[in-house]
Image (cartoon, helix red, strand yellow):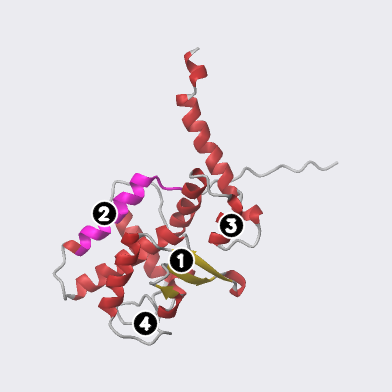
Amino acid sequence: MKIRMREPIRLPTVMSIEEVKSLLNIVYKQQRDCKQETFSYHMATRNIAIVELLFVSGMRVSELCDLRLCDIDMKQGCVRIIGKGNKERIVDISQKATLAAIKEWLREQGPCDSQHPLFVSRLHNKLSTQSVRLLIKNLVSSSQIKKEITPHTFRHTYATLLLEEGIDITYIQHLLGHSSVVTTQIYTHVNLQKQHELLSKKHPRRLI
C-alpha cells in the first residue's frame, strides 16, 4: 500500500498596509524630486500609475503590460482586463488617488490611438513584464522592507486584504480572474494564519 505524503501548502508572501504605503510613498517622492516637463518626471508619473494599478486591481503583471488605452474607463472608474484563456473581466479602480495617477499619466503621454499600450518603455514600446519587476525591485531596495516583493505580491496582498475585510471569496475569485474558486482558496489559509497571529495575542482566554 502506497502512502501519499501531502505536500505542505506554500502560503504566498503578503505585504502589510504599512509596507504598501511605504512603497507608494517612495514612488510619489521620486516624482516630487523631479522637475516637471523632464523625462525623469515623465517616467516617475508612469511608475506611480503602475504601482497604483497593481495594488488597486490585483491584476497580473502580464495583464498590466497588455493594457491598452481603450481598456481604461475613467468615467466609470474601471479597467477591462484580458486574463488567462482570453477571459475578460471588469475590475473597479475608482479610488481617487489611483484615478488621479492614471489621469496624470494619460496627460503625460499625450494624444494616442485607443489601441496604444497604456504603459510604454523609454523607447515608447509596450512595457515588458521584466521592466515592471525591476521597478518593484528598485522600490523595495529603497525601502526598509526585508521581504522578497514582486509585482505578483501586490496581487496576493490585494486578495488577502479584501478577504480580511469580509469580501466573499467567490467575488474575489472574479476580481482575480480565477477559473476555479479552489485556486482562490489559498487566501483563506493566509487569512487563518492572520487570525492565529491575532488571537494568540488578543484572545481573552490567555488572561484566565
Q: Residue furthest bottom?
A: 113
Asked if marks 1 and 3 touch (Cβ < 8 Å), the reply is: no
- Residue type pointed to by label 1: Val
Q: Position of residue 163 (x, y in %)?
A: 52, 47
- Residue type pointed to by label 2: Asn
* Residue found at x 34% / y 86%: 112
Circle 4 or circle 2, nearest the eye: 2
Q: Which badge, 4 or 2, comes first in the chain's sequence?
A: 2
Q: Nearer the viewer, residue 144 or 170?
A: 170
Residue at the disc numbered 4: 125
Numbered circle sitting on residue 61:
1
Numbered circle sitting on residue 25:
2
Secondary structure found at label 3:
helix
Q: Which badge, 1 or 3, comes first in the chain's sequence?
A: 1
Secondary structure found at label 2:
helix
Range of magenta residues: 13-31
Q: Residues within 10 Å of mark 1 (few under 14, many from 20)?
A: many
Majority SS type along the magenta span: helix
Q: Nearer the viewer, residue 22 or 71?
A: 71
* Residue found at x 32% / y 50%: 21
Mark 3–mark 4 distance (CA, rounded to whole Å): 32 Å
User: Could you say which quadrant of the image residue 77 lies in?
Assistant: bottom left
- Residue type pointed to by label 4: Asn
